[in-house]
Image: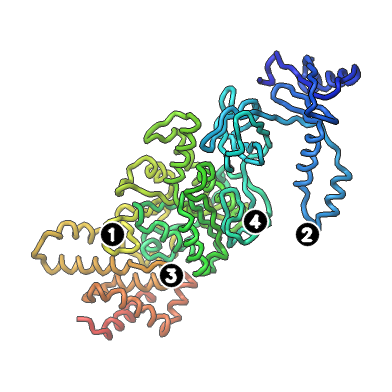
């Protein structure tokens, strides 16, 4: 029943019939509240001893003992602690508390199943609002129809049955946030799941919030170094950027994200890893890896595993982003990884189909693009006027047989500022990370590089592209001229140079020195199998005997012509001493 209906009626439930004075007071209250005279019907009920319950359309005024107790409970929940001693505040709150005749809406569950509940009687419920079901089960309004609403349930729905009551809370979905979450593993609702005890939250933030406006942003021009040679040199990522990591299953997508998190040690950057639909064992392994390499202290893991219901998988990335926004608003830099958004889209598709929404392309609902755009647009670098914090997003998407033209991949490619494409053939050929130079791109480009890295990278992408093209045309040729053979050997050396062990991020001076040496053709004549050993020995020699050069590159981020010439001469001398034929 809609409150604007001219046939609005009021029903009064109580054990004792109201007298004339009470009826007059009820009539005056209803006219003041709803602006007109509303007929009142009294119904005898033993369910409300010591009080009454007034129902006006979908509004309910519960003045029973149970209703007043709920008011007191809700008031006590909001009481803050004072140096860990809450008793004085509780006494003061109780002594000053006065119950109020507040309207609350109580609906009824008409159907439930597969984590979805259909509710009637909540005319004023809003999209994204949290509802409270029987036994404390919480849900979120996800679909608003003419006579009913569709709600996704965050807890086990066994206690929610047809006919059970459901109450509005007036709150939008949100998660607790704060410094205490660093180093912890939590679920999509911010509840710790690592067995290390409760977390003291510093606040509560909505999982859905508007993206920063254009005027509140500033250009992305500060590098977020991943420590991965092939990315930092050719596809740099800036603080506030959104860079997609895309590729088939088991091609090293998560490994790149984890390496980037490890490389943020001592770089004043907080990391958040959101696991969507992953195996619990995989999440535990990532936690142990981060802890082993000292990265867990500045990291948060938000997990909605494959065994969790679809609503939790749906809300997990938004919860992680809300935690990131807490730090960004404090002027800090945050790196957030969504692993992965293809599983997130599948969870949303399941919810949408259960909510009877019309399926579109590949059975995804029409708003699946908006699903990810409103998430990734929240990544930004804020202007200095509002703190200068940033959120850098690394969404991960899984492809099928390298098909980047599928629905979800093309959607997210169009939202992000570039993509790192991992190729299965390269991966199985031993090229790790298996970055495809031709299909990968960073739309921020050199703006997210230091001057030293930008100058050192030089013609690397062009040289690799020429090598890949020449490799295709000459793979069946038996007789090659000397120039072509030298070009192929040079390209093979560059590809081997870009190979990198997992969990071994490279510093800026390592990458710059290696690039200057390689692009000067210093590795000419070195067998491909010896390239890695040669580079490691060269870097060790620089760090031991020419530490001033390493320090200058790291501290200034500048590579002038004199320094380039010095690096080239030292590398050539080292190459000659190795006596390669």
Please tell me which of labels 2 and 1 falls first in the chain: 2
Q: Marks 3 and 4: which is nearer the front?
A: 4
Tag 3, which secondary structure? helix
Residue 84: assigned label: 2
Q: Which residue is mark 3?
A: 508
Tag 2, which secondary structure? loop
Q: Which residue is mark 1?
A: 426
Tag 4, which secondary structure? loop
Rendered-image quadrant of the C terminus: bottom left
Pick the residue in front: 255 or 538.
255
Q: Are there few (<14), some (14-19), or many (20+) residues within 10 Å of tag 3? A: many
Q: Marks 1 and 3: which is nearer the front?
A: 1
Please tell me which of labels 2 and 4 falls first in the chain: 2
Q: Which residue is mark 4?
A: 178
Q: Are there few (<14), some (14-19), or many (20+) residues within 10 Å of tag 4? A: some
Tag 1, which secondary structure? helix
In the picture, residue 415 is in which quadrant?
top left
Q: Marks 2 and 1: which is nearer the front?
A: 2
Q: Residue at 58% of width from left, 47% of height from top? A: 216
The reply, left or right, for residue 164 in relation to residue 17 is left
Q: CA distance from mark 2 to mark 1?
A: 57 Å
The reply, left or right, for residue 57 in relation to residue 406 is right
Q: CA distance from mark 3 to mark 4?
A: 32 Å
In the picture, residue 468 is in which quadrant?
bottom left
Q: Is residue 298 above or below residue 33?
A: below
């Amino acid at each position: 029943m809609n409150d604007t209906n001219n046939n609005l009626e009021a029903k009064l439930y109580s054990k004792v019939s109201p007298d004339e004075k009470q009826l007059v007071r009820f009539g005056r209250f209803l006219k003041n509240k709803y602006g007109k005279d509303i007929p009142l019907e009294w119904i005898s009920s033993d369910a409300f001893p010591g009080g009454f319950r007034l129902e006006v359309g979908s509004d309910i005024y519960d003045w029973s003992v149970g209703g007043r107790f709920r008011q007191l409970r809700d008031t006590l929940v909001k009481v803050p602690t004072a140096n860990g001693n809450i008793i004085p505040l509780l006494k003061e709150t109780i002594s000053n508390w006065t119950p109020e005749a507040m309207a609350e809406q109580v609906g009824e569950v008409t159907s439930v199943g597969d984590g979805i509940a259909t509710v009637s009687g909540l005319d004023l419920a809003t999209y994204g609002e949290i509802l409270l079901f029987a036994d404390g089960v919480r849900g979120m309004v996800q679909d608003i129809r003419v006579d009913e609403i569709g709600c996704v349930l965050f807890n086990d729905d066994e206690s929610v049955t047809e006919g059970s009551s459901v109450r509005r809370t007036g709150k939008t979905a949100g998660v607790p946030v704060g410094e205490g979450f660093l180093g912890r593993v939590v679920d999509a609702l911010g509840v710790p799941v690592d067995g290390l005890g409760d977390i003291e939250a510093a606040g509560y933030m909505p999982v859905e919030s508007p993206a920063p406006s254009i005027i509140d942003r500033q250009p992305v021009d500060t590098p977020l170094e991943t420590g991965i040679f092939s990315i930092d040199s050719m596809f740099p990522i800036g603080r506030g950027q959104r860079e997609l990591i895309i590729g088939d299953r088991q091609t090293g997508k998560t490994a790149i994200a984890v390496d980037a998190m490890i490389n943020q040690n001592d770089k004043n950057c907080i990391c958040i890893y959101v696991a969507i639909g992953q195996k619990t064992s995989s999440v535990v392994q990532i936690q142990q890896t981060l802890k082993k390499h000292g990265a867990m202290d500045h990291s948060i893991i938000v997990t909605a595993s494959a065994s969790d219901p679809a609503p939790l998988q749906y809300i997990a990335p938004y919860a992680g982003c809300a935690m990131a926004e807490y730090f960004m608003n404090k002027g800090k830099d945050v790196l957030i990884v969504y692993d992965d958004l293809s599983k997130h889209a599948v969870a949303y598709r399941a919810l949408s189909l259960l909510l009877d929404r019309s399926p579109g392309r590949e059975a995804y609902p029409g708003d699946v693009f908006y699903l990810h755009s409103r998430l990734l647009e929240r990544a930004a670098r804020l202007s200095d006027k509002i703190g200068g914090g940033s959120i850098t997003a690394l969404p991960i998407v899984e492809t099928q047989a390298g098909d980047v033209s599928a629905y979800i991949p093309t959607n997210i490619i169009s939202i992000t500022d570039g993509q790192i494409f991992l190729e299965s053939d390269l991966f199985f050929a031993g090229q790790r990370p298996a970055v495809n130079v031709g299909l990968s791109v960073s739309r921020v480009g050199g703006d997210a590089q230091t001057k030293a890295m930008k100058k050192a990278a030089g013609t690397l992408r062009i040289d690799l592209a020429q090598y890949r093209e020449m490799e295709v045309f000459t793979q069946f040729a038996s007789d090659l001229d000397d120039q072509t053979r030298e070009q192929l050997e040079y390209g093979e050396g560059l590809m081997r140079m870009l190979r990198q062990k997992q969990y071994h991020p490279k510093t800026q001076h390592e990458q710059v020195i290696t690039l200057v040496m390689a692009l000067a053709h210093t590795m000419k004549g070195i067998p491909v199998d010896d390239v890695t050993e040669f580079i490691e020995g060269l870097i060790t020699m620089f760090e031991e005997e020419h530490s001033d050069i390493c320090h200058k590159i790291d501290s200034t981020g500048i590579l002038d012509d004199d320094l380039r010439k010095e690096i080239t001469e030292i590398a050539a001398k080292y190459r000659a001493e190795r006596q390669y034929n």
